[in-house]
Image (cartoon, coloured by chain):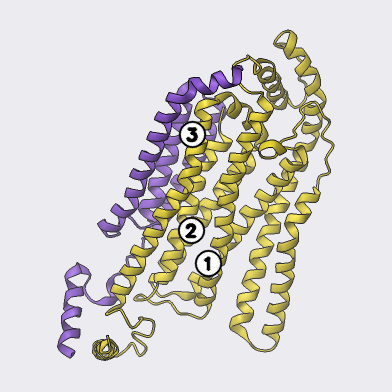
Amino acid sequence: MAQHATTTHAASDDHGHGHGEHFAHPAPVWVLLGTFGALIFLTILTVFIADNVELGSFELLVSMGIATVKAVLVGAFFMHMFWDKGFNVLVFLSSLLFFALFIGFALMDSYETLPNVSDYYKR
Amino acid sequence: MATTNVVRDEYSELVDLEHSHDHEHGQFIAHHFHSAEQQFDSGKLGIWLFLVTEVLFFGGLFVAYIIYRYNRPDVFIDAHHHLDTLLGGLNTIVLLFSSLTMAWGVRAAQLGDNRTTAISVLATMVCAALFLGVKAVEYSHKWDLGLLPGNLFSYDPLAKHDHALISNYLVMLCVPFGVLLLGFLLGAILNLNTGKKLIGQFYGGMAITMLGYFAGVGVGVLWMATMTPKHDSHDDHHAAVVVAADAVRPVVFSADDAAPKVETAVVDGAAAAEAPAGSTAPLDKSLGVFFSIYYCMTGLHAVHIIAGIAALAWIFYRSLAAQWRPDYFGPVDFVGLYWHLVDLIWIYLFPLMYLIR
């Protein structure tokens, strides 16, 4: 039994984290503060653009782009994805893939049925 | 497996030999895990899977938003005049700050600094409650104006909105938090006086959290109060604007006061005049659908904030009990990930709801 325990312990060493208590990756303080500063800057930027810059049809694209940059910052540093196991990141990003499929098919359907909806309101 | 416990005990002994300075190693390792790291990795994968379901859960509502905005862009442009960008922006910054304090708390727990973790988690809970307080002011103001979901929508742009500063709906939304505040205060005083320091501190922290809610309500009401004179003039002008919009788009206007609000009213009136183009449903009914989507998305988000406060309270208690160590901080990390996801969803909700121009 002691043999078994030693083996599993050695196996956990293979993860490259050394002994059990070294799997923590405390984020450096400057990374946390820098991320927060960037997030506040981007929030002010997106409000400023919405209030003062005429972007027309690009407006949604720009505001969603800024939101995505903010989301990546939160995900990478606050949520530790930068230091996390690749598999966990893959699992989470897969949800975005399925969400994109969901939107894509729903929009395709909406595009096809939009004329019918307009006809309904004209009646 | 009957021998599992034996394996773990021997393993614990083995680890104890290696780290003899650490007298309680393995105290928090469940019997079916071989090591603290394995336990942490399992929990981490579990919370990531949960977050995947959360993304898809909110995904349905985002799709509803996208389809409706795609079909009726005019409704969304009109609706944004009813949402206060400053309060939304304030709430965004509050949530971003709460994410910082949460990440700070996780870092402290990883370093075994339970005191800093407790303070960080408390700050996170206060921010969460403050967010809810501001949201309560926003909601109650909309309910007063009749900006309600679906067929309940009864907003009349021509009506005079001489609503009270403190809405009855706001008072109702404050009652549960007031009761909790009193309960936690009482619990804190009683327990601290009878020497039960841990639970007393916990109740004290929760009372401070509830005070955060009332701070949010205060900020929201103060902001609404500074807006009220403008609101009244906005409403006074509104009838004239709508009439004017029928004839000619008003270029010259007695816009001596409240210039931005008058501008808003002009757009309102113009939209109302242009909307019945014959090809679409009446604007007011469609606005009701917008507010259905608005209340579903922000409401579900608020429910997540409340659930987050409950989960954070558990983390707060365990931080006060000094249970985190460099090899055992999983629960802080996992609740933190959930909290950051709630923040992530708001990062998208804010521009989609408040920043449509």
Q: Which chain is yellow?
A: B
Q: Which is nearer the eye, A36 or B322?
A: B322
Residue at the top extreme of this rendering: B248
Q: Position of residue B197 (x, y in %)?
A: 61, 84
Q: Which residue is mark 1?
A: B311
Q: Give me the chain letter of mark 1.
A: B
Looking at the rendered image, the disc whose residue lies closer to the viewer, 1 or 3, is 3
Q: Residues within 10 Å of mark 3 (few under 14, many from 20)?
A: some
Amino acid, disc 3? Ile
- Asked whether the residues under the numbered discs 2 and 1 touch, taking CB atoms below 8 Å apart as contact, a structural biologist would say yes
Whole-number angstrom distance, CA of label 3 to CA of label 2: 25 Å
Q: Residue at x 47, y 40 (%)?
A: A42
Amino acid, disc 1? Ala
Dot placed on the residue nearer the N-terminal end, 1 or 3: 3
Which element type, helix, strand or loop, lies under badge 1? helix
Tint of chain A:
purple
Q: Residues within 10 Å of mark 2 (few under 14, many from 20)?
A: many
Q: Which is nearer the eye, B43 or B126?
A: B43
Q: Give me the chain letter of mark 2.
A: B
- Asked whether the residues under the numbered discs 3 and 2 touch, taking CB atoms below 8 Å apart as contact, a structural biologist would say no
Q: Is residue B5 visible?
A: yes
Q: Which residue is mark 2?
A: B339
